[in-house]
Structure formats: structure tokens, C-alpha cells
Image (tube, rainbow, N blue to C red):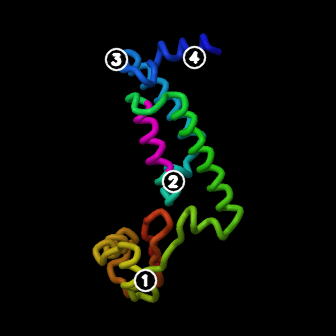
Amino acid sequence: MAEALDLLHQLVGRDDEPILWWQMWVRATVIMLVGLVLVRVAGKRMFGKWGAIDTVVAVILGSNLSRTLTGGAPFLPTLSATALLVLLHGVFSALAVRFSWLGPAVKGRSVRIVSDGEPDQEAMRRQGVGTNDLEEALRKGGVLDCRDVKEAWIERDGQISVVRR
């Protein structure tokens, strides 16, 4: 075990010493491969829908891998903590599907911002959606006039969906 750890330190450098250029290359290669594996394990959910939990884990994952690359954090402990974050993401996502009360806390909730052609200004304000944002979403939904909208929702992923009358 000690020999394997010594070999690892020769390849990627020690956490308390400056990293040589070629050790940075080895780290970059390992981190790229580990990052790809973690993204594949996490699945499309993490990087496809971008709910609150997805965004938090993606930012932390990128930050951890970056710090590991540059030697700003210990190599193996940081990689293992990053893998744990991906595992926890999967656990929380699975629990949110199983327990309906947990879903809104983990994934967020949809909010109606237009009802029967009338924009809900208060809901729009709370969600950070301006009139121009709503008009853009309507145009993308093929609607030019808000009066032609039965409902519009800001979805959990931040997109605005439009239901025509």
C-alpha cells in the first residue's frame, strides 16, 4: 500500500509541495477521466434539467475538480469527496421521486405566472421574470398576445412553458 501511495505521489505530486508541469498533466488526465466517469454516473438528470440540486452539485463538482487539478486541494481526498457528492445527488434525486414532500425542496416547484391571459405580476416578481422574459417565452411558444394564453408556468428548470387557449 505504501509503495502504491509513493508511486501516486511521484505521478501527481505531493499535496504539500509544488507540482511540476508534467505532474499537472498527469493530474489533468486523471481528473478528466474521473470527471467523465462521474458525469456518466450522475446521468443526464444532473446536466439536463438544472434544478436547484443539479446546479449546486455541478458547481461544487467543477470547483473540486479544478482545485484538485491545480493542487489547491489534496488529490485523493478531494476526488473521493467529489464522487460522494455525485452519489448523494443520485440519492437525493431518487428520494425526491419516492417522497413527494421532498421533491419541491430538492428540485423546486413550478409556478403559474399567467392565468386566463392575465399575467400574475406578483408571481413574476417573486420568480424574477420580467415582462420582456414573458413576451419572449410567448413568442417561442408561438403566441403573440398574452390574451391567447390559458396558462404559462415557470418550470422547475427555469424555462417558461406556455399553454394556449
- Residue marked by disc 4: 5
Q: Along the polypeptide, which appears first: circle 4 or circle 3?
A: 4
Q: Which numbered disc covers residue 114?
A: 1
Quote the CA–CA distance across marks 4 and 3. Answer: 20 Å
- Residue marked by disc 3: 21
Q: Is residue 119 magenta?
A: no
Q: Amino acid at mark 4?
A: Leu
Q: Quadrant of residue 19?
A: top left
User: Mark 4 falls on what kind of element?
Assistant: helix
- Nearer to us of marks 4 and 2 is 4
- Nearer to us of marks 2 and 1 is 2
The stretch in magenta equals: 57-68
Marks 3 and 1 in Cβ contact (< 8 Å): no
- Residue marked by disc 2: 54
Marks 2 and 3 in Cβ contact (< 8 Å): no
For the stretch drawn in magenta, what is the main secondary structure?
Answer: helix
Residue 69, given in percent of the width and then of the height, sits at 41, 29
Q: Is residue 151 left or right of residue 22?
A: right
Residue 163 or 128: which is nearer the viewer?
Answer: 128
Q: Quadrant of residue 119?
A: bottom left
Q: Along the polypeptide, which appears first: circle 4 or circle 1?
A: 4
- Nearer to us of marks 4 and 1 is 4
User: Mark 1 falls on what kind of element?
Assistant: strand
Residue 152 or 20: which is nearer the viewer?
Answer: 20
Quote the CA–CA distance across marks 2 and 1. Answer: 27 Å
Residue 8, given in percent of the width and then of the height, sits at 53, 16
Quote the CA–CA distance across marks 3 and 1. Answer: 56 Å
Answer above or below: position of 58 versus 157.
above
Q: Along the polypeptide, which appears first: circle 4 or circle 2?
A: 4
Residue visible at 28% across and 74% down? 132
Residue 57, given in percent of the width and then of the height, sits at 50, 49
